[in-house]
Amino acid sequence: MEGSCTCGALRYRLLDAPMIVHCCHCTWCQRETGSAFAVNAMIETDRLEVTGAVDYVMTPSASGKGQEVARCAHCQVAIFSHYGGAGRKIAFVRVGTMADPAACPPDAHIFISTKQPWVELGAGMPAFDGYYRSADLWSEASLARRKAVLGK
């Protein structure tokens, strides 16, 4: 999978499948994206090949640890983020910046307690009021990858 910013100066390629893809409905994601949710593909940063100039911008987060948003240095489109818990070891890639976003559908909807009432979720899709235990949803292979990169 590959993608880019709007102007094309920053391009990226995922060197592996994402560990998991979340559609997050928290109010922070709504505010930061200006939309009803954010769709993020989680992948180890060393499996994300980036070309072009990146501006890293620290923003507040609900956890209090902050979120580092990687933006194109030219058009300022957000491409991926790093959250305080994992730091720069895991990238949360914005699926909407992919060349084919349909190829990376969400595995789960999270923080649906604050989802917009007009957003309808597909039947049978895992959905959680907040977050969840990774061991309850992630594949064994993804859990092993997460443990390898985070050491836990």
Image (spheres, rainbow, N blue to C red):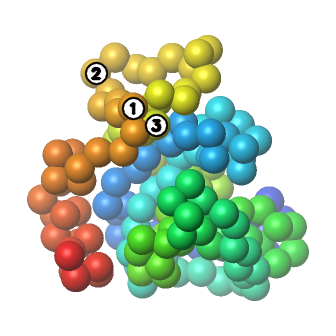
Q: Amino acid at mark 2?
A: Gly
Disc 1/disc 2 C-alpha distance (Å): 15 Å
x and y, in percent, of residue 14 in the image? 46, 70
Pointer 3 residue: 111
- Binning the other alpha carbons within 10 Å of mark 3 as few (below 14), some (14 to 19) or many (20 upward) gives some
For the residues bearing labels 1 and 2, Cβ distance under 8 angstroms: no
Tell me the element at label 2: loop
Q: Is residue 38 visible?
A: yes
Looking at the image, which residue sits at the far right? Answer: 74
Q: Is residue 2 visible?
A: no
Which of discs 2 and 3 lies nearer the camera? The answer is: 3
Q: Residue at x 72, y 44 (%)?
A: 31
Disc 1/disc 3 C-alpha distance (Å): 5 Å
Which quadrant would residue 116 be assigned to in this image?
top right
Q: Residue at x 22, y 62 (%)?
A: 142
Pointer 1 residue: 129
Q: Amino acid at mark 3?
A: Phe
- Most foreground residue, 116 or 5: 116
In the image, is residue 119 above or below residue 11?
above
x and y, in percent, of residue 139 in the image? 17, 54
Pointer 2 residue: 124
For the residues bearing labels 1 and 3, Cβ distance under 8 angstroms: yes
Which of discs 1 and 2 lies nearer the camera? The answer is: 1
Q: Amino acid at mark 1?
A: Asp
Q: Left of 122 or right of it: where is 95? A: right
Tell me the element at label 3: loop
Looking at the image, which residue sits at the far left? Answer: 140
- Binning the other alpha carbons within 10 Å of mark 2 as few (below 14), some (14 to 19) or many (20 upward) gives few
